[in-house]
Each structure stands twice: as C-alpha cells, then as structure tokens.
Image (spheres, helix red, strand yellow):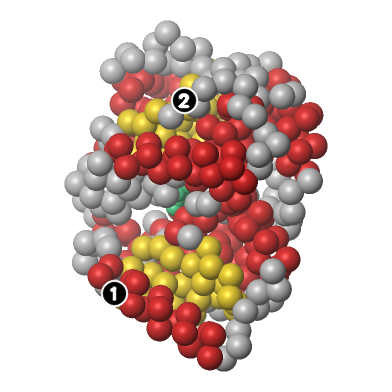
Amino acid sequence: MSIEAHQDWLNKQSRVSLMHGPTPLEPLDRLSEELGGPRIWLKRDDCTGLATGGNKTRKLEFLMAQAIEQGADTVVTYGAVQSNHARQTAAACAKLGLACHLLLSERVDWPHENYTRQGNVLLDKLFGGQLHICSLNDVAATRETLLQQFADADRSVFEIPAGGSSPRGALGYSRCLQELATQCETQNIAPDMIVHASASAGTQAGLVFGRSLLDIDSHILGINVFHPDPQTLKDRVAFIVNGMFDTWSEIRALRPLQIDVNHAYFGDAYGIPTKACIDAINIAAQFEGVLFDPVYSGKALAALIDQINLGNLSHLSDVVLLHTGGSASLGAYADAFDD
Ligand SMILES: Cc1ncc(COP(=O)(O)O)c(C=O)c1O
C-alpha cells in the first residue's frame, strides 16, 4: 500500500481534531555526537499540543470521534494514579464538552506525597476530570458501582480502555508511522530503527499494523516499561493488531507482523524509575533541552543510550526515538531527582 493509499483509507475513519501536527522530526546532534553511534532523530509526539502533549492524543482523536458518534455524554477511562492517558482524556473531554471520570488504581509503590498531588493528578483536576482512586484489587468493583450509578442517572457512557489501547485507538499510531514516513522521505533519511516506550501496547500495535501495510523497512522496537513478563506485552500487541485486521477486513497485510520487545530496561516494577532512566533524563535535558519522564519515555531513552554505548547499534546510520511524552509527571516524581 502506498503512503497515499494508506492516508486515503485513514481519512475515511472518523476522527476529531485534537492535536498539533505533524509533530516535528528533529535530529539530536549533540547527544548523537556525545554517544558516538547512529544519528538519533526524535519524533516529537511529546508536542502533540493537547494538555502538554503525549502519545494518547493521537489515539483519542479516533476514540473521541466514536464517543461522539455514539451520543455519549460521559467518558470513563482507567489508568495508574499518574496516568498520562487520564490527563489527556480529561483535556479532550473538556474540549468536547463531555463529563470525564477517571478510575485510577494505586498500583505503583512510590510513597511520596508529590505522587498523589502533583503532575498528572493536578492537571486531571484542572481539566475537570472526576477522580476515583482505589486499590488495584478494587478496580472491578469500583467500575461496576460507577457504571451502575450512570445507568441509574440515564447517562450515556463511553468507556475507553487503559491507555486508549484498542484497535480504533491504535489507528493513531498507524497514522503517526505514515506521517513519519513522509518526513523521512522529505529529509532524505531511511531510519534503520524506531524505538519507543511500550506499555498498554496500542502505540506499538499501531506502528506494527502500519508497517505491515506500508513499504517501510525500519525495525520497530518496543521498550517494555509495564509488564513483568515481556511475553504478555508481545501477546497484547498481537491481540490489538489482529483486532485491527478483524475490524477493517478490507485491509490486508503486505508482509508478516514483526513484534519486537526489549525487557532489559524495565527495572524493579512499572512506575519505579531506574538509575539509568534518571541519568538519561538528565542527559537529554542538558544536551538537547528536551524533557523525558521517569516512567515511560525516560526508560526508552535509557535503552537507546545503553544500546549505543554497548556498540550494538554501531552498524546503523539513523535511528528514530519516538518521544511519547510524559514529562507532566516530572513534578510527581521530584523525589527521584534528589541527590
Ligand atoms: C508517556 C507515555 N509513553 C509511552 C506510553 C506507552 O504507550 P502504550 O500504552 O500505547 O504502550 C504511555 C502509556 O501510558 C505513556 O503515557
């Protein structure tokens, strides 16, 4: 499928406009020189514009269109307490005039006051999101109670899965790959690799789906930041991609799916920053003036830096780091930066 045919097909899917785009593709020349490996290009999806930006904006463009088509007046979504997806969903709801309920689970053992007051929590509230915070074990029961309350009040609810990671949400990253392919053509580069943080799997699923349709050779590598067992992430990516082919049965893959995950930068647990991640955040800030986050994009950057330092990428000329955002949580993790 040509880029144009893919674009025409995507343009037929319902989408609301929420983002600034195309997001820039910028070389990180000072960092590349310091590391001495391939030239690093940063795809700036931290600059999507909505509510300080991030990867959820692209997914929400497709998901919120469906909410509106279904006549929803209330959106319910899920995530960890410092969920970037929750923050962007709250902002999208504010922009579109929908009520927003955020069911946030206490799944991260980061016992600092900033975690529950600052960062995404503060912004969720500013955007008018209603927060329902509960333990991980209580999520199902809290959801049931909430949905029953809405049914009793005759509210029309649209549920969005954690991370916006459904086949429809993942279309946002098929669209991103197409945008990136056009930028690479214009800048005359053919990146050997696209690296990004992967968690609820919708970003990677959209990229893998797009790559199977378009004539793009870049190797896509998801850095697992969420699943204690990386096979769960691979299975989840495959599940969403297969769901995309089921939903849009007119689309056929041109080549086999390739799902690659690196688990070496996960650390102790989801939401717990590693030392390499904190170092990477400091390096990017001081060499490039760019902010990364301690849960997602910082771990992806740490992975890329380490792989270059190990010499594993020395045969490559250009790599793209997809910046998925997340810096809104930096204040919530201020304690991670104490010396
Ligand atoms: C900043 C950031 N980067 C990366 C990801 C991972 O994206 P996905 O959940 O689509 O795998 C997330 C998900 O929450 C995120 O907030």
Q: Is residue 301 visible?
A: no
Q: Residue at x 54, y 44 (%)?
A: 243
Residue 144: quadrant of the picture: bottom left
Q: Is residue 56 above or below residue 159?
A: above
Q: Residue at x 65, y 19 (%)?
A: 215
Q: Is residue 21 above or below residue 162?
A: above
Residue 138 bears which disc, if any? 1
Residue 65: image x %, image y %?
70, 60
Which element type, helix, strand or loop, lies under badge 2?
loop
Callout 2 amino acid: Gln
- Indicate the quadrant where residue 66 lies: bottom right
For the question of whether residue 65 can be seen, the reply is yes
Q: Separation of disc 2 and disc 1 at Cα?
A: 36 Å
- Residue 165 position, x and y percent, is 50, 52
Q: Which mark is residue 122?
A: none
Q: Residue furthest top?
A: 315
Comparing 118 with 242, the one in front is 242
Identified by mark 1, the residue type is Asp
Estimate the x, y position of residue 193 in percent, counting from the top left: 49, 22
Q: Answer above or below: position of 243 versus 68.
A: above
Rendered location of residue 120, percent (x, y): 44, 65
Tag 2 residue: 258
Disc 1 element: helix
Which quarter of the picture shows residue 114?
Answer: bottom left
Mark 1 surroundings within 10 Å by alpha-carbon count, few (fewer than 14), some (14 through 19), many (20 or more):
few
> Height in image: 318 above or below 9?
above
Left or right of 53: which side holds 294?
Answer: left
- Return the residue nearer the eye: 240 or 96: 240
Residue at x-position 29% and y-position 38%: 230
**Which residue of the protein is positioned furthest toward the bottom in this rendering?**
153
